[in-house]
């Protein structure tokens, strides 16, 4: 089980550095990378502690899963707003998409 979590963690953490490298100038990497990694890992630590606390309080996992769904929907709304505000990525998609007919 720990190997599965390790593989997932190994895929997420490098993607943070790639995103920071793509979105911000290299001169700002000295403070953006540590801040990004600190907040990401703090969120992971708090999330697992909070889920355990909810399990201890209620005795089953349903409230923890429900709250995680709410937080993930909030996260998607924030990311969607930021993408909309910046006008999208401005990049060509690698995968072909369906053409809209107007």
Image: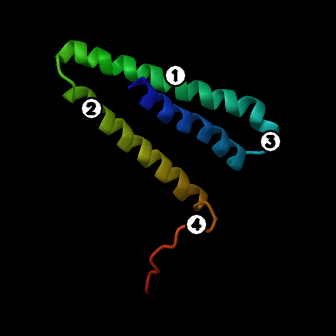
Q: Is residue 39 left or right of residue 68?
A: right
**Image spot of residue 98 (x, y percent):** 44, 77
Which of the numbered marks, if any, corresponds to residue 94? 4
The residue at which mark 1 appears reads as: 42
The residue at which mark 3 appears reads as: 26
Q: Quadrant of residue 74?
A: top left
In the displayed structure, 100 sits above or below 65; it is: below
Q: Residue at x 64, y 65 (%)?
A: 91
Label 4: how many residues lie within 10 Å, few (<14), some (14-19) or many (20+)? few
Labelled pair 1, 2 in contact (Cβ < 8 Å) = no
- SS under mark 3: helix
Distance of mark 3 from mark 4, alpha carbons? Answer: 25 Å
Distance of mark 3 from mark 1, alpha carbons? Answer: 24 Å
Which numbered disc flags the more N-terminal residue, 3 or 4?
Answer: 3
The residue at which mark 2 appears reads as: 65
Which numbered disc flags the more N-terminal residue, 1 or 2?
Answer: 1
């Amino acid at each position: 089980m720990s190997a599965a979590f390790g593989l997932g963690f190994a895929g997420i953490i490098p993607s943070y550095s790639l995103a920071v490298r793509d979105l911000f100038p290299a001169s700002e990497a000295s403070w953006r990378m540590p801040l990004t990694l600190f907040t990401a890992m703090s969120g992971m630590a708090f999330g697992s502690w909070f889920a355990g606390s909810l399990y201890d309080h209620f005795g089953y996992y349903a409230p923890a899963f429900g709250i995680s769904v709410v937080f993930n929907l909030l996260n998607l709304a924030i990311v969607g707003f930021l993408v909309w505000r910046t006008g999208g990525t401005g990049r060509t998609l690698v995968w072909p998409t369906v053409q809209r007919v107007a």
